[in-house]
Amino acid sequence: QVQLVESGGNLVQPGGSLRLSCLASGRWFSINTMGWYRQAPGKERELVALISSGGSTTYADSVKGRFTISREGAKNRVNLQMNSLKPEDTAVYYCNYRAESSVYWGQGTQVTVSS
């Protein structure tokens, strides 16, 4: 089993910045992908950004140029730096870890962009 604990969600004004962090613990796979998804009220969960254990990244078109995903330490922590936030970025953000045939989710952290 893999446990994921997210932090960093908050209320921020449009144009502001937030940094989300997710720490993975438990069983570890040397080849894995970690990332962030989000779900706004009444909408399906969608991909935000992914980063592989080798450092390859993927971003949703809606966040390219504004969000940056990174890994640190023993690579079991993934961060999402979010700049130039917009009201449409408001959602619950979920950390995701996948390796081999297993997928794990964090409990989610709320990001609200509002004046």
Image (tube, rainbow, N blue to C red):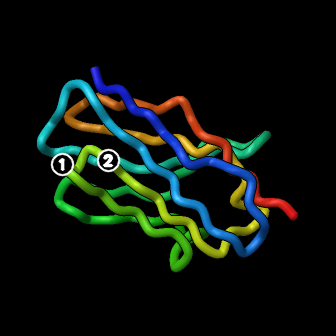
Q: Amino acid type of disc 2?
A: Arg
Residue that mark 2 sits on: 77
Look at the numbered disc 2 and give the secondary structure of its residue: strand
Residue drawn at x 56%, y 66% is 82
Look at the numbered disc 1 and give the secondary structure of its residue: loop
Can you name the residue that lies furthest to the top here? 1
Q: Amino acid type of disc 1?
A: Ala
Residue drawn at x 25%, y 30% is 101
Give the numbered dot on residue 86. Answer: none
Q: Quadrant of residue 15?
A: bottom right
Can you name the residue that lies furthest to the right here? 115
Position above or below: 77 against 101? below
* Residue 56, image x, y percentages: 26, 65
CB atoms of marks 1 and 2 within 8 Å: yes
Please indicate whether residue 39 sits to the left or right of residue 112 in the image: left
Residue that mark 1 sits on: 74
The quadrant of the rendering that contains the C terminus is: bottom right
* Residue 39, image x, y percentages: 65, 43
Categorize mark 1 by other alpha carbons within 10 Å: few (<14), some (14-19), many (20+). few
Residue drawn at x 52%, y 79% is 65
Q: Label 1 vs label 2: CA separation?
A: 7 Å
Q: Quadrant of residue 17?
A: bottom right
Categorize mark 2 by other alpha carbons within 10 Å: few (<14), some (14-19), many (20+). some
Residue drawn at x 38%, y 56% is 50
